[in-house]
Amino acid sequence: MATFTVRGKNIEITPALKEYVEKRVGKVTKYFDKVGEISVLLTVSKGRHTVEVTVPIPGGVFLRGEETTMDMYTSIDLVVEKLERQIRKHKTKLARRFREAGFREEVVKEELSRREAEEEPLDYPVVKKKRFVVKPMDVQEAIMEMNLLNHNFFVFRDAQTEEVEVVYRRDDGQYGLIEPGN
């Protein structure tokens, strides 16, 4: 049985709601021999009910899903469907990466035959390529460039570290920075 951390923002986590989350989100554990502690954040804001789920799986990989509807239980159901879709979509890559780590490919195959691939194709077609010079600059310059171009993200080379980084505009209007890690 997986362990859960269920937190609420502007909502009280009742025992019934927690039980529903654990039962529904717990379905994704059948695809793996073991998972880490599953984190679930339930948020209510302006009548919108958002569920964010993070499932750590072996090898330092995380499954993540987020859904927002006008009903918390519907959001929970939809986020579980989204996570299962991610697992089915990436089953070959997951199986290859976790050969000894306990990925249950046979469960995915059973699910696929049961549902008969109602989803989008398993490929990710690249429909456009761009080439550009990644100029050295600081984060503030990169944000300014991104805003001048009216883009949601911007790739640049940090003037001090020489590392390629990405700035992006978050849904809340703030900015984020993606740095290379080890």
Image (cartoon, grey):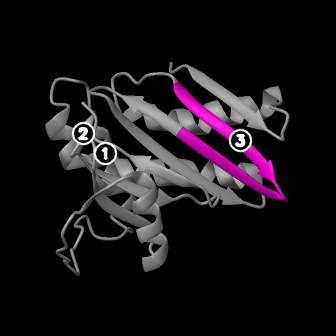
Check the image and report above or below for 138 versus 99: below
Which secondary structure dominates the residues rendered in magenta? strand
Amino acid on which the number 3 mark rests in the picture:
Leu
- Element assignment for label 1: helix
Identified at 31% across, 51% down, the residue is 165
Identified at 73% across, 30% down, the residue is 18
Q: Are marks 1 and 3 in contact (CB under 8 Å)?
A: no
First in sequence, mark 1 or 3: give its number.
3
The mark found on residue 105 in the picture is 2
Check the image and report above or below for 181 versus 67: above
Amino acid on which the number 1 mark rests in the picture:
Val
Q: Is 39 in the magenta?
A: yes
- Element assignment for label 2: helix
Residue 6 lies left or right of residue 122; in this view the side is: right
Mark 3–mark 2 Cα distance, whole angstroms, equals: 30 Å
Q: Is 30 in the magenta?
A: no
Q: Is residue 97 visible?
A: yes
Task: Between label 1 and label 3, give the one nearer the viewer.
Answer: 3
Identified at 41% across, 61% down, the residue is 141
User: Magenta span covers which residues?
Assistant: 38-53
Task: Between label 3 and label 2, give the one nearer the viewer.
Answer: 3
The mark found on residue 108 in the picture is 1
Quickly name the residue at label 3. 42
Q: Are marks 2 and 1 in contact (CB under 8 Å)?
A: yes
Check the image and report above or below for 153 versus 100: below
- Front-most of residues 116 and 60: 60
Residue 92 lies left or right of residue 65; in this view the side is: left
Q: Is residue 85 visible?
A: no
- Label 3 crowd (10 A; few <14 / some 14-19 / many >=20): many
- Label 1 crowd (10 A; few <14 / some 14-19 / many >=20): some
